[in-house]
Amino acid sequence: MWGGSVTPGFSCRWVFVPLGMKGRLSMTAFGLLLTLSLAIGQPLDRPLERFEFTQIHMGMPFKCIVYAPDDDSANAAVRAAYARIKQLDGIMSDYDPHSELMRLCQTAGQGQSVSVSPDLLAVLSRAQALSRQSEGAFDVSVGPAVRLWRKARKTRVFPSSEEVAAARELVDYRNIRIDEKAGTVKLLRAGMQVDLGGIGAGYAVDEALKVLKEKGIASALVDASGDIGVSDPPPGKAGWRIGVAPLEPDADPSRYLLLNNAAVTTSGDAFQFVEFDGKRYSHIVDPKTGLGLTERSSVTVIARDCTTADSYTKAVMILGPEKGLKLIESTKGAAAIVVRAPEGNVETFESKRLAKYLDPGERGASAP
């Protein structure tokens, strides 16, 4: 993903005071009000400035762009947003053996209904809903297969058919039981591993935007290495101009979007893949095969929140263009672009709602 450049705008607020026959607001009084306003830290008509920050969380860079009246307010708001992201990493990480998620996984097959935090409950509930909608194309119980595939990518040794079969045996979202009313989760099979890599970053982006809004930042962009969420447009702009990552990593953006209070995510194998015997495998694992996807493809999903955009890219990648776009069309406010290259021939598929999110200069243009 690339973010388009944005020029800071200016805000202007006019206060109209009715003038009656019995009294008028004198310039002296107005000057006193202006002096008082500045003294208590509420300047009139102060332009917003653009501030940009980057920190590493969840093993990836999180970029925050905010429009604020000054350094202090920008820093305070972004500091709180990063603290929230760090907190969520401590809940959802599958690399940290002490995270809340890993503590839950340690109870798999023991018959325990485990009380979980509201955040973990929310993410797992959203994941399970998509698992049902996609008939298992998206499945957070894919952890054993993901771990096997990570090892294969690291060692460059293709897993044996026995290893793949053993991992696949443990993958089934229906073995995750959630009681939302009680706030509990039960993992039915011993050895199950929940992996939130396909949804957790999007949830963190949404939560960071909420914190920024609570801190008085109305116009912000949060980018978790391609999982992008935005709030109100930059001052004087109709939206945030965001380029859609193309299939080839070194190419320019293929399309441009204009978004506000929305999110976009692109998933593909442009950067993360491995080759075995001349065959290319993506880092995105198909829960049904236990292996990385082999077809060159890229999926971009636009949605009302980043949790949806992040998770739906994986579901659409696995479902393919026909079934994937049906899922998108059935989801309120969602749109998608699917680019695939079977045998090197590039094909592009677009959902019906895509046009409403395109930069006006892109509307009416044919897909590349």
Image: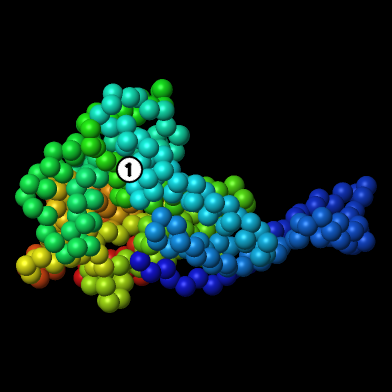
Left or right of residue 241: residue 314: left
User: Which image quadrant is residue 287 in?
Assistant: top left
Query: Image point 28% across, 26% down: which residue?
Result: 110
Crowding at label 1, few (<14), some or many (≥20) Cα neighbours within 10 Å?
few
Badge 1 is on which residue? 332
Nearer to us in this view, 177 or 103: 103
Which quarter of the image is occupied by the C terminus? bottom left
Above or below, comparing residue 115 to residue 35 in the picture: above
Task: Classify residue 63 as left or right of residue 39.
Answer: left
- Label 1 sits on what residue type? Lys
Q: Is residue 320 visible?
A: no
Q: Residue at x 18, y 39 (%)?
A: 171
Q: Is residue 227 left or right of residue 78?
A: left
Q: Is residue 171 above or below residue 252?
A: above
In x, y percent, where is residue 19? 85, 52
Task: Please name whichever residue, 154 or 356, is drawn nearer the observer in this view of the structure.
Answer: 154
Q: Position of residue 35 (x, y in %)?
A: 86, 61
Tell me the element at label 1: loop
Percent x, y of residue 279: 9, 66
Task: Compare residues 225 and 20 and report the one nearer the observer.
Answer: 225
